[in-house]
């Protein structure tokens, strides 16, 4: 029997905070004391037409939250709790929910849909509650079903489809759902709410319709209905339908040929005349088609499958499609450049134009250039900006040969436009210059648009424009980023950019100091451009400058420690600025440590830098500064054994970073720094190893740990083992089971999922690196400890080698660990190696490889195995 | 309005610099991990034994041998008749040997091409060809801060500093001090250059069990980066150079045979791409010459003249049989017991004979020499008898030489790689 909870639910929404708190506390207690009764009471409240809408709505929301959570562990717990509820209570709850779909109160219907979907997401994959689909479909076919019931039923169907995956439904069920949804779109029988719900449900059901799209009759029927409803008089329905078409474009690209003519007309009308949200979806349809064709082209290039199998829709539509997009470019909003991430017709149109250029290459150029030429000098700023935007958009895709002459003849014009009176025009022009440098400038290319003759003029314009309004200045930073990138030099050749670097650095540093904007992007652009400049500079010519920059950045980082911090906002600003400055220091450390001549500079300033980093860490109490952590890693590598004097102070922050697996990036970076320190300190790391190892093992056993951190943790076991050698012995009983568990886990990963495949490769590599480090670390004294693990390891290598999805890095790690096994365990592995003769083919394959490192490793391993076999 | 989730505005850059910093840091860590693991692999890896039939119980040269051998002159090509017990040493240990011991050991380390008496099938697919520089074959070992080249008979040619790994006493930043390398070279007098025709070990990596294809790849990628190809300097007395190696198709054969090289040619060498480096005679490397590409087409006698009758050097066995240097040896005749007693020859002696053309027969493709006329004991610098293929080649050279046209004719005209004809098994 359900409890009466209306009053508590209403009290929980009271304006009086005290009443609210008491009510929330009551609810929480109720939930803890008797979860099944709590759930039952909530569903009873939700389904009762006599109760106020407010209490019903809240009952539904609490019910939903007691079934689902964002956090995976929490969600699993809630799922288990639901599964364990008494069957009769569960059926009552479900029954009342389905009933509520016919409620006259919209909030009750809507909330009920959401709860139904959550329960379905738990039960349908377990092949339970199969009658739900039947009941929902009944609602659609009963002649006496009310419009609100149909609307809610379709909404529920949509949510259910969103929650479950295609393999959870039988094809018959899918057919019935699609039939119901398509019928719901019928204009004669249904009102606009029902039809909108039907379209939204179709959007979620599309993933289930593979078999139906493969069938021409069914496909054509679905497409016909969709194209009809795309011209409904209600803009919401048109928008939702176009969202469906966008999804169809990417999911069912291969089936679209017969409908493209209709779809072009439909989308062109929407782009030209419909309301903005609809027009944006129509543009998105074409962007998605481009995505598909670019993807197919990349795949066919990668796997060399010869002529690409795609339908070339973009090429066919090109003469009409390009003008359509060009029209959108002059529909800018005022002040759009002041706003981050603005999305409107002209942005979407320019973005689509860029994708078209990447899809078709040279063919777009003659279609765009007349528009550029006729608009770029017009009085209306919209024309000038649109023309430049069009030009900038098509710089990626067409060949350098096609573009270079245009850019050569237009460069001076663009440089002059940096003095335009309109800041939109200047913004887009600076962006276009950046695109030119990104795609058409490389010191080593014969077509580079920047030459010794043009560079002085370009530099003077950029250094002047960087003082323009903030949004223009930010784009100029972007242009400088790509400009310096194009001059990235080898070690020997002198760069013609070197004489300008001093001025650029000065300009970037004062840009970073600007106070005329509250937008943090300008500052970060300035520092990031500085990073690229350091990375690309020719150290032989610039070591002095880089050293001065190092001192300046240390000085700036020191000043952040003196900032007056009152609010959490102040704290955040300080932290952001420290991130940028630590980033620059990291880049400088890495650059200087690349060469023997300059690495002494780091040693000279290492104490000062380390003090600063430690102070940055101490600005926060609970989390570790990610950028400071990265910088310390670089410093550890650069200073080598000297780092030992900092380790004691630094250790607590390292530990904090390793513990912080909620922020998995921070955790992952800290794990990487463990490796840096191991290589810097060798066995001097020993006193800290118990702490580090126990934290790493703890992390691995925690289900909350983000999976991307696991492979680096395994690799770091190898780093530690290599550093401390025989002292790693005491960790073996813990580490080996972890490695074997992870090895088993690899074979459970789905090979059909690209992400899982990549993760599997990372994991395998991490496991191999761990074994390699341990074997090499034990080689001279403790190798026998690994004897019992040799056979499982060999079996694992064999399994990995037989996996066709392994990448080259995994292969290399596998070959290396094979050699390590033979090297460390010697004649003891003779029988094993004879039993697992897969290495013969593997090494044969690797020695044929084009990858020199792989070849080198394979040769070494071959030698090691040979030595064992003849012993 | 924000853009749809999957869509990024073209005006926003794709990758944040922070993400780049993370990725670059990761890249650096990965590289350094791999470096330090590789260092660990090399540091303690025991050096490889040289011969492929090596045993694991290495016999280290004892002090006696070293002191006893230390006073013998290095440059005298003296070879004691008594056969020393076969020693299984690695090259580092062997390089500590001195005098006779060292010569005996090193004399067995070179891969010796057979002479081309007929044309192997699939020459164009499975073989490389290159012009052999004129000069002495040498086995060059750099280790312990010095470089030693030894001739075919094991005697030292030069003892010098070089830029090869650990080949001189300069600081070699690129490898540990115990590192060594072994090259198969021809020393070309006119430009005082070691032309490297094979790489046997490089920075402790043994290449014995690698295919020629791979060894040449390794040679070409590693030699130059060591600085060994640079002009001579204080710490690098002789220049090393690679020879151009061609696939043995029409164009490659033509290039090796007719194109002028920076060195004087002495014939043409053919290497089977799939063959490992094998010490001693091997049919998977072949030498061929004619008057056009070599000044030494026909063998000369001790005066440097071509004798009217072909001469051969054979090894006398215990029972008086006269054999070639092949393994197993080919018997070309035998000496009478009383002749042996009179002359006091001992088993293992190398003896020079003249052959009478009219007594030579080719039976079932095999050469039989018939009547051998003793001339003298051979030059003491020689370490080996002639091989069967050499005797045969010299015989053919005097009567019906294998011509360049014959070799060229056996090679199919160049076909594109994907032509199905290549897959047809020809004559095998």
Image (cartoon, coloured by chain):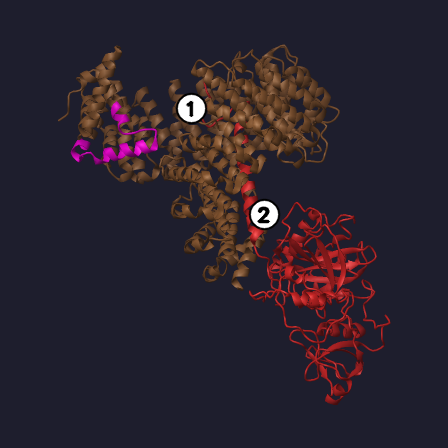
Chain colours: A brown, B red
- Image quadrant in which you'd find residue A222: top left
Question: Where is A18 relative to B305, above or below?
Answer: above
Which residue of the protein is positioned furthest toward the left in this rendering?
A: A1
Residue annotated with mark 2: A853
* Residue B5 can be seen, yes or no: yes
x%, y% of residue A366? Answer: 64, 26
Which chain contains the residue that carries disc 1?
A
Q: Secondary structure at mark 1?
A: loop
Does the segment drawn in magenta span residue A77?
yes
Numbered mark located on residue A621 in the image = 1
Task: Pick whichever, A281 or B27, lies toward us.
Answer: B27
| Secondary structure, magenta segment, majority class | helix
Question: Where is A174 relative to A185, above or below?
Answer: below
Q: Which quarter shows the N terminus of chain A?
A: top left
Question: Where is A596 relative to B59, above or below?
Answer: above
- Specify which label sits upstream in the sequence, 2 or 1: 1
x%, y% of residue A39? Answer: 20, 27
Task: Pick whichever, A348 or B148, lies toward us.
Answer: B148
Choose mark 2 or mark 1, whichever is in front: 1
Q: Which residues are magenta?
A: A62-91
Q: Secondary structure at mark 2?
A: helix
* Callouts 2 and 1 on one subunit: yes
x%, y% of residue A696? Answer: 41, 38
């Amino acid at each position: 029997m359900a409890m009466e909870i209306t009053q508590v639910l209403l009290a929980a929404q009271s304006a009086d905070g005290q009443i609210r708190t008491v009510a929330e506390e009551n609810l929480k207690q109720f939930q803890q004391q008797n979860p099944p009764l709590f759930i039952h009471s909530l569903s009873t409240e939700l389904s009762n037409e006599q109760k106020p809408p407010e209490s019903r709505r809240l009952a539904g929301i609490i019910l939903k939250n007691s079934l689902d959570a964002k956090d995976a562990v929490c969600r699993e717990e809630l799922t288990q709790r639901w599964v364990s509820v008494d069957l009769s209570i569960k059926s009552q709850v479900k029954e009342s929910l389905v009933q509520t779909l016919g409620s006259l109160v919209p909030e009750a219907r809507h909330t009920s849909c959401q709860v139904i979907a959550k329960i379905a997401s738990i039960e349908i994959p377990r092949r339970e509650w199969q009658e739900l689909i039947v009941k929902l479909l009944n609602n659609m076919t009963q002649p006496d079903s009310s419009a609100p019931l149909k609307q809610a039923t379709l909404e529920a169907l949509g949510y259910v489809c969103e929650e479950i995956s295609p393999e959870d439904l039988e094809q018959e069920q899918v057919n019935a759902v699609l039939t119901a949804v398509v019928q719901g779109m019928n204009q004669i029988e249904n009102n606009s709410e029902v039809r909108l719900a039907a379209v939204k449900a179709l959007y979620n059901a599309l993933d289930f319709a593979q078999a139906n799209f493969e069938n021409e009759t069914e496909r054509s029927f679905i497409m016909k209905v969709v194209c009809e409803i795309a011209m409904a008089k209600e803009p919401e329905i048109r928008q939702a339908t176009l969202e469906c078409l966008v999804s169809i474009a990417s999911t069912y690209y291969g089936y679209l040929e017969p409908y493209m003519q209709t779809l072009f007309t439909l989308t062109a009308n929407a782009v030209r005349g419909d309301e903005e949200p609809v027009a944006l979806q129509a543009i998105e349809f074409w962007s998605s088609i481009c995505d598909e064709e670019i993807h197919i082209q990349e795949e066919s290039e990668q796997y060399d499958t010869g002529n690409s199998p795609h339908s070339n829709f973009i090429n066919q539509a090109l003469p009409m499609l390009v003008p359509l997009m060009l029209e959108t470019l002059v529909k800018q909003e005022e002040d759009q450049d002041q706003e981050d991430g603005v999305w409107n017709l002209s942005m979407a149109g320019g973005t689509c134009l860029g994708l078209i250029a990447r899809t078709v290459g040279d063919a777009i150029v003659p279609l765009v250039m007349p528009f550029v030429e006729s608009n770029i000098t017009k009085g209306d700023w919209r024309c000038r900006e649109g023309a430049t935007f069009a030009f900038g958009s098509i710089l990626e895709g067409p060949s350098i040969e096609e573009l270079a002459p245009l850019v050569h003849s237009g460069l001076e014009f663009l440089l002059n436009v940096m003095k335009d009176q309109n800041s939109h025009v200047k913004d887009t022009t600076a962006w276009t210059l950046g695109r030119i440098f990104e795609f058409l400038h490389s010191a080593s290319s014969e077509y580079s648009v920047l030459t010794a003759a043009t560079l002085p003029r370009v530099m003077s314009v950029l250094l002047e424009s960087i003082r323009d309004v903030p949004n223009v200045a930010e784009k100029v930073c972007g242009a400088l980023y790509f400009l310096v990138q194009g001059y990235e030099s080898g070690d020997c050749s002198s760069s013609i950019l070197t004489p300008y670097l001093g001025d650029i650095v000065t300009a970037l540093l004062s840009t970073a100091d600007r106070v005329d904007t509250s937008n943090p992007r300008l500052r970060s652009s300035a520092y990031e451009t500085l990073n690229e400049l350091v990375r690309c500079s020719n150290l032989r010519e610039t070591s002095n400058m880089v050293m001065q920059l190092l001192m300046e950045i240390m000085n700036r980082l020191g000043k952040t420690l003196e900032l007056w911090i009152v609010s959490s906002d102040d704290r955040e600003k300080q932290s952001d600025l420290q991130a940028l400055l630590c980033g620059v220091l990291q880049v400088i450390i890495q650059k200087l440590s690349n060469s023997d001549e300059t690495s002494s500079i780091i040693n000279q300033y290492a104490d000062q830098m380390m003090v600063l980093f430690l102070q940055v860490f101490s600005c926060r109490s609970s989390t570790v500064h990610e950028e400071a952590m990265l910088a310390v890693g670089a410093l550890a590598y650069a200073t080598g054994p000297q780092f030992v004097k900092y380790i004691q102070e630094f250790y607590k922050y390292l530990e904090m970073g390793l513990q912080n697996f909620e922020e998995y990036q921070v955790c992952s970076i800290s794990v990487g720094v463990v490796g840096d320190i191991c290589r810097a300190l060798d066995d001097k790391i020993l006193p800290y190893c118990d702490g580090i190892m126990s934290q790493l093992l703890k992390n691995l056993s925690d289900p909350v740990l983000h999976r991307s951190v696991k492979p680096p943790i395994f690799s770091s076991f190898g780093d530690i083992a290599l550093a401390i050698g025989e002292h790693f012995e005491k960790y073996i009983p813990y580490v080996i089971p972890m490695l074997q568990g992870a090895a088993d886990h690899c074979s459970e990963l789905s090979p059909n999922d690209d992400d899982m495949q990549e993760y599997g490769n990372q994991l395998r590599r991490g496991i191999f690196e761990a074994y390699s480090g341990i074997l090499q670390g034990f080689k001279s004294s403790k190798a026998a400890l690994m004897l019992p693990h040799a056979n499982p390891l060999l079996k694992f290598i064999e399994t990995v080698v037989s996996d066709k999805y392994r990448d080259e890095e995994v292969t290399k790690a596998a070959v290396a660990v094979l050699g390590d096994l033979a090297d460390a365990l010697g004649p003891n592995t003779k029988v094993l190696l004879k039993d697992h003769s897969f290495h013969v083919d593997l090494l044969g394959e690797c020695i044929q490889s084009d990858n020199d490192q792989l070849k080198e490793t394979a040769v070494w391993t071959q030698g090691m195995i040979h030595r064992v076999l003849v012993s | 309005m924000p853009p749809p989730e999957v869509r990024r505005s073209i005006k926003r850059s794709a990758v944040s610099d922070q993400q780049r910093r993370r990725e670059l840091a990761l890249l650096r860590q990965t590289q350094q991990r791999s470096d330090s693991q590789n260092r660990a692999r090399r540091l303690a890896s025991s050096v490889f034994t040289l011969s492929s039939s090596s045993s694991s119980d290495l016999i280290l040269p004892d002090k006696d041998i070293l002191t006893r051998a230390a006073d013998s002159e290095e440059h005298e090509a003296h070879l004691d008749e008594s056969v020393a017990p076969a020693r299984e040493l690695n090259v580092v240990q062997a390089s500590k040997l001195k005098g006779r011991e060292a010569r005996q050991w090193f004399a067995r380390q070179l891969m010796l091409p057979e002479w081309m008496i007929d044309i192997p099938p699939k020459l164009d697919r499975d073989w490389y060809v290159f012009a052999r520089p004129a000069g002495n074959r040498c086995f060059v070992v750099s280790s312990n801060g010095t470089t030693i080249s030894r001739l075919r008979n094991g005697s030292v040619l030069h003892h010098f500093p070089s830029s090869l790994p650990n080949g001189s006493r300069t600081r070699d930043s690129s490898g540990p001090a115990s590192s060594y390398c072994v090259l198969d070279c021809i020393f070309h007098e006119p430009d005082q250059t070691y032309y490297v025709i094979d790489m046997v070990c490089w920075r402790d990596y043994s290449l014995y069990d690698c295919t020629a294809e791979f060894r040449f790849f390794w040679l070409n990628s590693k030699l130059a980066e060591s600085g060994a190809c640079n002009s001579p300097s204080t710490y690098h007395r002789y220049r090393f150079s690679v020879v151009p190696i061609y696939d043995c198709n029409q164009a490659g054969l033509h290039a090796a045979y007719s194109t002028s090289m920076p060195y004087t040619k002495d014939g043409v060498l053919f290497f089977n791409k799939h063959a490992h480096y094998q010490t001693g005679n091997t049919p998977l490397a072949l030498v061929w010459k004619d008057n056009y590409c070599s000044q030494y087409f026909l063998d000369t006698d001790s005066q440097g003249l071509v004798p009217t009758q072909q001469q051969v050097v054979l090894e006398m066995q215990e029972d008086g049989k006269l054999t070639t240097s092949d393994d197993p040896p080919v018997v070309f005749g035998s000496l009478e017991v009383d002749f042996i007693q009179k002359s006091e020859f001992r088993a293992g002696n190398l003896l020079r004979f003249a052959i009478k053309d009219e007594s030579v027969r080719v039976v079932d493709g095999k050469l039989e020499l018939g009547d051998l006329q003793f001339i003298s004991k051979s030059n003491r610098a020689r370490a080996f008898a002639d091989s069967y293929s050499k005797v045969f080649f010299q015989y053919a050279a005097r009567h019906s030489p294998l011509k360049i046209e014959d070799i060229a004719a056996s090679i199919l005209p160049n076909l594109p790689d994907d032509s199905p004809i290549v897959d047809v098994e020809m004559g095998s």
